[in-house]
Amino acid sequence: MNDFLNTFLDWDYIWQVFPDLLGTGLLNTLILAFTSAVIGTVLGMVVAVMGLSTKPWFRWPSKVYTDIFRGLPAILTILVIGQGFSKLLRPIIGTNPYPLGILALSLIASAYIGEIFRSGIQSVEKGQLEAARALGMSYSRAMLLVVIPQGVRRVLPALVNQFIALVKDSSLVYFLGLLTSQRELFRIGQDLAANSGNLSPLVAAGFVYLVITVPLTHLVNHIDKRLRTGRTVQPEVDELDELTASGKVQP
Amino acid sequence: MTAVTPVRSSSVELRDIHVSFGTLEVLRGVDLKVEKGRTTCVIGPSGSGKSTLLRCVNRLQEPDSGDLLLDGESVIASDPDHLRQRVGMVFQHFNLFGHRTVLDNITLPLRSVKRIGREEAEETARARLAEVGLADKAPYRPSALSGGQQQRVAIARALAMDPEVMLFDEATSALDPELVKGVLNLMAGLAERGLTLIVVTHEMGFARGVADEVAFMDHGKVVETGSPEAVFDAPGSPRLQRFLSQVL
């Protein structure tokens, strides 16, 4: 029994691998996840706005793009882009697979995030756009200042969920073959586990993943709750004020 | 109401306006003329095309055919964003921007459309809020206000753009009965100040008391127009007589 437990939880071994996990692995996982989250969010907004256009030549490319990157397994996309584009982009990025990993993760994320944004923007009442247009704002200005900010706010929980998925999916760039200094959490755990035949490094890597993802999950719940209840202090509706305005009583 | 701002108003004329949604003809050749500084109330059963007609005046609804004149000039083919700066609109459901404070609701269009600086925009916004009796609500979100207060903010927001014409689309229909009067009084004040108003309403008391002219619509046409006295006390057409017997 003790043997069995030691396969996962060899504490001495776990302590030993932690510096590597935190110094190299955590750093790389965060770089991969954060960079592709930023690019994926920007691209996702473009995909969403195009998907909402009334013009078919905007809408269709957005639909096809979403269908492809949401419909393929992440690992397939990462391998095809990571290996397929490496020759093409060699003059720019050299033989480094790292940027291509980020590119692939960003494209996958943008397809999901685009759908999240689209549903959020669509959930904003039609009257908001109409009121903004009636005040003389152009369509794009009304979308930018009135509709999109409200739509995005409503889907923040779903967006953070997508970021959580991205943290986990960043482990898939392992398949592109990274330099020692580029290894992220999973790769480091996996390498050490393979060398020693003991799973403790993977368990330790898993623990570090949880340290990132669990707070994010709680952030989702927090945002969700805040969106439901509202955080601004609600003043009491002043009955006297209403009566004054209707001329029933003098102030 | 303090600090009454002088108004520049314009006449409005709709000529032979047609609007169809698919096979449904919503407006079937509507003519309506509103003199500068006058108030016209549009009444009629639901589905008669009142709101669609009103939305043609600022071209939120583009007519299939017909002409629209503002201050005697055709604006049916001009830049709609420019037209909408001259024609304010107040909606049944207020449509205040939920993610912005009451003050920002007014400064946002001033700054983004009229390109007015922050300080001047806030000054204008506060003055307009004071006019509708809500100066103290500036920092709150719209959701913190009652329906009546929200609608008064919406009116202040439209007024801040210095419109020459104001459109009211059933502005009190979504309000609790005790809040209706505050909004109607505000609208009556605007009429008194000489702003051109076109008011789609179910408030027959308001139409009788404030309107210079009442237009009765049915089945996508203006069936009868005239002074409130003429329309309410001596209705000519059987359809108007039937409508009035149902609502009065």
Image (tube, coloured by chain):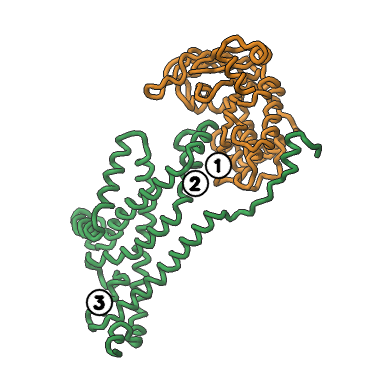
Chain colours: A green, B orange
In the picture of the structure, the residue carrying the numbered disc 3 is A191
Give above or below for B79 relative to B13.
below
Give above or below for A190 relative to A111.
below
Q: Chain of mark 1?
A: B
Amino acid type at mark 3: Asp
In the picture of the structure, the residue carrying the numbered disc 1 is B97
Q: Residue at x 47, y 13 (%)?
A: B29
Q: CA distance from mark 2 to mark 3?
A: 45 Å
Residue A96: percent from the left, percent from the top?
25, 63
Give above or below for B202 relative to A227.
above
Quadrant of the frame with the N terminus of chain A = bottom left
Q: Say which quarter of the image contains residue B247.
A: top right
In the picture of the structure, the residue carrying the numbered disc 2 is A150
Q: CA distance from mark 1 to mark 3?
A: 54 Å
Disc 2 secondary structure class: helix
Disc 1 secondary structure class: loop
Q: For this rendering, which residue is in front, A75 or A106? A: A75
Q: CA distance from mark 1 to mark 2?
A: 9 Å
Q: For this rendering, which residue is in front, A240 or A107? A: A240
Residue B205: percent from the left, percent from the top?
68, 24
